[in-house]
Amino acid sequence: MPLKASMHILVIDTNSTMRQNVKKLLSDIGFKNIKEAASGKKALEVLEESSVTQQPIEFIISELELEKMTAIELLSTIRKDPKNAKTKFLLMTGDSDQQKMMQAIRAGVNNVVVKPFSADMLKEKIAKIYGQ
C-alpha cells in the first residue's frame, strides 16, 4: 500500500516544541492531516473523536514518556480497542533502555525512532511500517 498524503496521523508528546517539529517533518514528507495531543489521555480523546467523525487515526507517533500514562500503557489500551487495534504506532524516544523497548515490542509497537531524527529517517521508519 503506498503511503497516502491524506493519511490521518496523531503526534503525541508532552513537549509542544517537539510536537511542532514532528508535525513539520511530517508536512515536509507530504502528509496533510496531522493532529496532536499532549498526553495519553488526550490522545485517547482524539482517537475517539476521530472515529465518531469517520476520519479514524491511521498512524500514531508517540514519545515514550508521557504525563499520567506512558506510551506503552497508551499502546496497550489502543490495542485492546477493536476500532483502533490495527492502528500503526511509531514510538519516538531518546531513551535506549532495553527493558522499555522490550515492553514496547510486547505491547505491539510497529517501530521505534530515536531522537533526534530527520525527515528522511522518519519517512524510512514509516515506509518500513507499511512494508515499503
Image: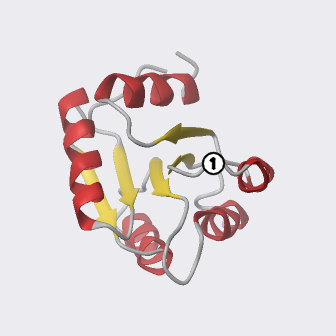
Report the side of 83 relative to 80 (left or right): left
Residue 77, image x and y in percent? 67, 70
Which residue is located at x 43 percent, y 78 percent? 45
Q: How is the image coloured?
A: secondary structure
Residue 47 higher or lower than 4, as above or below: below
Residue 23 higher or lower than 4, as above or below: below
Report the side of 105 relative to 75 (left or right): right
Toward the viewer: 51 or 124? Answer: 124
Residue 15 higher or lower than 117, as above or below: below
Question: Which residue, given by chain and number where applicable, does mark 1 sit on?
Answer: 86
Residue 97, image x and y in percent? 69, 51
Q: Amino acid at mark 1?
A: Lys
Which residue is located at x 27 percent, y 32 percent? 5
Query: Residue pushed farthest top?
Result: 132
Residue 84, image x and y in percent? 58, 59
Toward the viewer: 62 or 53? Answer: 62
Residue 131, image x and y in percent? 58, 20
Toward the viewer: 87 or 54? Answer: 87
Which residue is located at x 55 percent, y 60 percent? 64
